[in-house]
Image: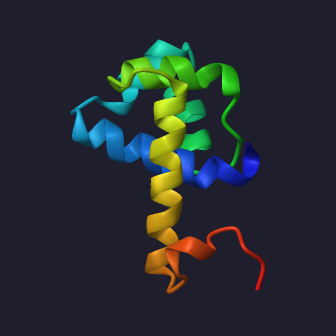
């Protein structure tokens, strides 16, 4: 899960903006402080898989799997931004 953490954080930020959910609402839903949330969003601590369903529903997604799909899309997009072909994400050079 830790390898996906930056992509999950990016997906959370993108989806929160898309559905106009303030990040403080996400911290409240998770029962954590805002600083703890930002610590995770800054990829200083990995997301716990148990948190993903709560995050997903707060962000108006069906479930954690939909959030993970968004994270995979974010990962593909960031690899394109870095000049890597989207089909080569995760492939060693």
The residue under the point 23% across, 33% down is 19
Foreground pick, 18 / 43: 18
Foreground pick, 87 / 72: 87
Q: Quadrant of the N terminus?
A: top right
Q: Please state the horizontal and vertical placement of residue 17, each as a whole percent of the image.
A: 26, 42
**Left or right, 49 with reference to 84:** right
| Count of marks placed on residues | 0
Residue 36 versus residue 4 in the image, above or below: above
The coloring applied to the image is rainbow
Q: Is residue 43 visible from the viewing direction of this image?
A: no
The residue under the point 61% across, 42% down is 39
Residue 29 versus residue 17 in the image, above or below: above
Q: Quadrant of the C terminus?
A: bottom right
Task: Give the farthest residue toward the right.
Answer: 92
Residue 7 versus residue 38 in the image, above or below: below
Foreground pick, 6 / 39: 6
Q: Please state the horizontal and vertical placement of residue 58, each as a whole percent of the image.
A: 38, 19
The residue under the point 53% across, 60% down is 75
Q: Please state the horizontal and vertical placement of residue 22, each as a whole percent of the image.
A: 30, 30
Q: Please state the horizontal and vertical placement of residue 20, each as a whole percent of the image.
A: 21, 33
Residue 13 versus residue 26 in the image, above or below: below
**Left or right, 93 with reference to 70:** right
Q: Could you say which quadrant of the image residue 40 lies in?
A: top right
Q: Is residue 15 visible from the viewing direction of this image?
A: yes
The residue under the point 46% across, 55% down is 73
Q: Could you say which quadrant of the image residue 8 lies in?
A: top right
């Amino acid at each position: 899960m830790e390898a996906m953490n930056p992509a999950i954080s990016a997906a959370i930020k993108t989806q929160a903006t898309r559905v106009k959910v303030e990040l403080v609402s996400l911290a409240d839903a998770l029962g954590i402080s805002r600083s703890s949330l930002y610590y995770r969003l800054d990829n200083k601590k990995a997301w716990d898989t148990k948190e993903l369903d709560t995050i997903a529903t707060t962000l108006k997604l069906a479930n954690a799997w939909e959030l993970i799909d968004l994270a995979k899309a974010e990962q593909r997009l960031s690899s394109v931004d870095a000049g890597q072909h989207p089909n080569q994400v995760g492939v060693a050079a």
